[in-house]
Image: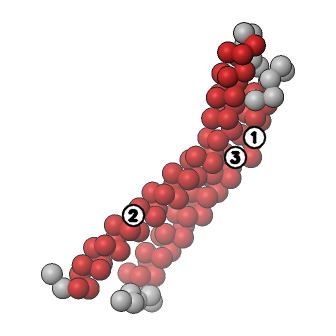
Amino acid sequence: MHILTKFLVIKKHLDLFKILAVYAAALFIAALPFIIAYVGSSIEEMISGEAMHEGNSAFMAFMWLFLFSIPFGAFIVLFSTITYIKNAFSFLSGKETLKV
């Protein structure tokens, strides 16, 4: 196999891993308030023995951060998707060349 062909195969897999890593990070950012609220309120409920809600638990107030984290995560996914598509079209049209 030619060295350039090997490089293209490796680059294709690395690009796929980068895309998946960005999407995973965006989903994690979007779900982070839920994770914090669920884990924190579960621990607080085990300690206090009463049901937790946003009125008596600071952790359940983290759910209000969904108003910011879900749009931010969606923006990251949208921006990265547009960037990946733009880069793919510029590479396929020949405006961008691979440097070995």
At numbered mark 2, what does the secondary structure look like: helix, strand or loop?
helix
Badge 1 element: helix
Image coords of residue 52 (percent x, y):
74, 17
**Residue 19: % across, % down:** 46, 62
Q: Is residue 16 above or below residue 31?
A: below
Which mark sits nearer the N-terminus, 2 or 3?
Answer: 2
Residue 46, image quadrant: top right
> Whole-Å distance between the Cαs marked 2 and 3?
25 Å
To which residue does mark 1 refer? 65
Amino acid type shown at disc 1: Leu
Label 3 neighbourhood size at 10 Å, few (<14), some (14-19), many (20+)? many
Query: In which quadrant is the N terminus drawn?
Result: bottom left
What residue is shown at x 45% (from left), y 89% (from top)? 95
Task: Please give left or right for residue 49 compared with residue 12 in the image.
Answer: right
How did the renderer colour the structure? secondary structure
**Is 30 situated left or right of 14 in this image?**
right
Report the amino acid beneath label 3.
Answer: Ser
Q: Which residue is mark 2?
A: 16
Name the image quarter holding residue 2.
bottom left
- Residue 66 appears in the picture as rendered: yes
Labels 3 and 1 touching (C-beta < 8 A) = yes
